[in-house]
Amino acid sequence: QVQLQESGPGLVKPSETLSLMCTVSGGSISSFYWSWIRQPPGKGLEWIGYIYYSGSTNYNPSLKSRVTISVDTSKNQFSLKLSSVTAADTAIYYCARGGGSYYVLYYFDYWGQGTLVTVSS
Amino acid sequence: QSVLTQPPSVSAAPGQKVTISCSGSSSNIGNNYVSWYQQLPGTAPKLLIYDNNKRPSGIPDRFSGSKSGTSATLGITGLQTGDEADYYCGTWDSSLSAHFVFGTGTKVTVL
C-alpha cells in the first residue's frame, strides 16, 4: 500500500520560503506525477504543481513565479519550496500521487494526511 | 477562483439519491478526464471516481460518475450518514498555461 507523509515547519514568517518534504513508502517514486495541493482553512482545494519522476515539472500559473518542486528518486522523496510567502499562503499542504499520460494529469489516487503551514510573524 | 463550478450544497434523507454537478468548458472538462474526491471532516481527500466514470477498488457502486460535453456529474445513491462530506471534481485544463483544476466543492448533508 502506497503511503505519503509530509514533513516540514508548521510556522513560516512572511517573506520567507516555505519548504516541505513528502516521503513515499510502499512503492517506487518512479513513474507517476507527484503533486502538491493546498487547502486554506475552510476553503477549497488548489493544485500547486507536479514533478514527474524524470524531473519534468508543471506548476499552477497563479503560483509559478514562486514555486519549485524537486525530486530525489534515491530517497523516494519529493519537495516543495514556495518563496515570498504571505498570510494568504496559510493552508493545509497535501502531497499526492497523480496518474496521467503525456504530462496531463487525470487523477490523484494516494494522498498524504496533510500538514498545516501558518504564515505569521 | 476556480474554473469548475459546483453547487455549494446538496442534501437528502438517508437512503435517497443526490447528484452533484461540475460545470466547466471545452478547455477542461470538454476535452479531459474528470475525477471526483470525497473529503470527510478533518481528513485528506479520497479518490472516488477517475477517468469520468471508473471507481477505484474499494469504492462502493453507490457512487457513480458521468460526463456530457462540458459538464460532469457525481451521483450518490442509498445515501448514508457517513457520506456527509465535501465533494470536489477535478480535471486538467488545456488552456495556454495548462494545469490541473479543482471544482469549487459541494457540501453533502444527510438530513
Image (cartoon, coloured by chain):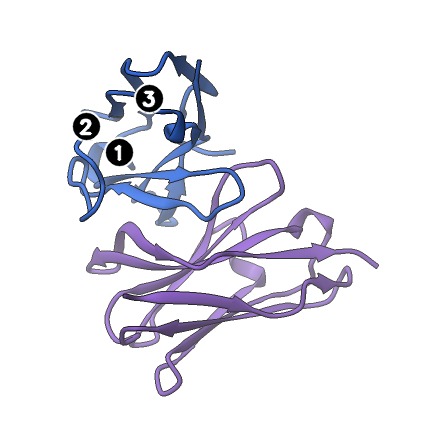
Chain colours: A purple, B blue
User: Which chain is indicated by disc 3?
Assistant: B
3 or 2: tag closer to the N-terminus:
3
Q: How far apart are marks 1 and 2 (CA)?
A: 8 Å
3 or 1: tag closer to the N-terminus:
3
Count neighbours of disc 3 (C-alpha within 10 A) and say few if under 14, some if 14 to 19, many if 20 or more.
many
Q: In this view, does B84 lie above or below A12?
A: above
Q: What residue type is labelled 1?
A: Ile
Left or right position of B64 against A48: left
- Mark 3 lies on residue: B20
On-image quarter of the N terminus of chain A: bottom left
Q: Which residue is drawn at 30% across and 66% down?
A: A2
User: Which chain is indicated by disc 2?
Assistant: B
- Mark 1 lies on residue: B29
Query: How many numbered markers are drawn?
Result: 3
Count neighbours of disc 2 (C-alpha within 10 A) and say few if under 14, some if 14 to 19, many if 20 or more.
some
Given contact means CB atoms under 8 Å apart, are the residues at marks 1 and 2 in contact? yes
x, y percent for residue A117: 65, 57
- Mark 2 lies on residue: B67
Secondary structure under tag 3 reads: strand
Q: Which residue is drawn at 73% across and 50% down?
A: A87
Q: Nearer the viewer, mark 3 or mark 1?
A: 3
